[in-house]
Image: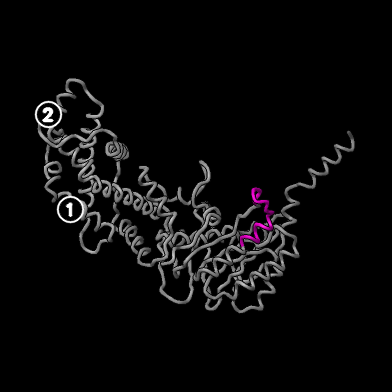
Amino acid sequence: MINFGIDKQTILDLNIFPQANGDLSVFNYYNQTKTKGGRDALENMMRTPLNDLDEINSRISTISFIINNHFTFELKKELIDFIEYYLRQDIPILKNNPIDSFFSWISDVIKPSNNYYVIARGLEYLKIYISLLSDFLGKINSKDIPDFFQLFKNEISELYTNPDFECLLNQKKEKLTFRQISRYDHLFRKKEKDRIERMLKLTYLLEAYLSIALTAENNKLAFPVFIESTNLSLKINAIFHPFIENPVKNDVASLDNKNLCFVSGANMAGKSTFLKSVGLCVYLSHLGFPVPASSMETTVFNGLYTTINISDNINKGYSHYYSEVKRVKDIALMLKEKKRLFVIFDELFRGTNVKDAYDGTLLITNGFAQIKDSLFYISSHIVEVGQELEKLDKVSFKCFESKLQGEQPIYNYKLIDGISSERLGLVILKNEGILEIIDEIINEKVYQ
């Protein structure tokens, strides 16, 4: 099976993970976990998009099952942290025989030991933890449940039917005897340690799933529906970017036999945010996550590559333009290697002069339009490129309208059919009062 293709540039473009404390990120948007293990489980999921439809649908069914049944499970961080601490202790495991058990207890009575306290408390917390899980999973009907929950229920069932655990899990007293402490320490940290670690791993996955489900409910996100088809398809209704407060929502739909969408519009009209929103929905759908939209239908892609916020590379001596050229080449090589990719370019060749940018954008866009087994979204404010591309039957055209009200640009951020002819760059420049500042500097120099 081909792995889903993704790279560092795409992860950065879509703000999947924070680069510094306080950064807005998609990870933080979905992350409502309390434990380190839960956070790590969520991060691992978000770093590994899928292109196996069965795996994607399995994850979707797990999260939607939680939402539909209104499941909640309060995972106590202090409890889990202490259990992890106990299991990782580099102290001798107590011996499972009456004589050694007695002497360990006597030794602790005469000279209290932190090690013995950690073992005793760790076992008590393990008992509480397993009991909480058993109560939670016991409320889940055994019919038609996702594989994840069935696996979890089986693990708990095996624990309760295992004679080694039966006494501990069924006893009413909270305090363990010195004999039980030795016996169960030997059991949990040696004989059955792998089983307990499996349980913890499933618990962290559960916390991650609960976090995603809660985010979906709070933000009215929709689950993607995947279409099994040889033709590439993408349809998203009321798409929005999760970082924007009160966002304007738009619809996205690929057209039959048109594998390239050319997006135009003036500066600040909304092109980049729109492309990030589309890329994000494609990315999240291949995680099996609910997406920021009212509905989404898509085919399975084998990779997602974006070029939105590319910069020069001082270490390699690359100019901005050469970095762009290298990026186009890298993606072309990916297209040669893999089929069914989703590719986004925002403002191709902005690092060179207008003539070269026009020629280069037209040349590359024309070439990509001939690659039928991948989908492309390419934006530009060079409207002449769009006018030339109208001659091709494989390109669809979308744009963001804007207008001047006096000298003030007005944007509605609504996506419509067609090619934008608005040019507001110079107006924006003038409105910032830069020329006035420069004139003031010149006048000050003259009179000094």
The percent coordinates of residue 400 (x first, y second) are: 62, 64
Question: Looking at the figure, which quarter contains the C terminus?
Answer: top right
Amino acid carrying mark 1 in the image: Ser
Q: Which mark is residue 297?
A: none
The percent coordinates of residue 256 (x first, y second) are: 52, 78
Q: Residue at x 61, y 69 (%)?
A: 262
Q: Which residue is mark 2?
A: 102
Q: Residue at x 25, y 47 (%)?
A: 194
Question: Looking at the figure, which quarter contains the N terminus?
Answer: bottom left
Q: Residue at x 42, y 58 (%)?
A: 221
Q: Which residue is mark 1?
A: 157
Question: 225 or 171: nearer the eye?
Answer: 171
The percent coordinates of residue 120 (x first, y second) are: 20, 33
Are the residues at dot 2 and dot 1 in contact (C-beta closer than 8 Å)?
no
Which of pointers 2 and 1 lies earlier in the amino acid sequence?
2
> 251 above or below 433?
below
**Region of the chain picked out in magenta, as a range:** 313-327
Res 335 → quadrant: bottom right
Name the element at disc 2: helix
Question: 87 or 237: nearer the eye?
Answer: 87
**Disc 2 crowd, CA 10 A, few/some/many (<14, 14-19, 20+):** some
Q: Is residue 383 left or right of residue 213?
A: right
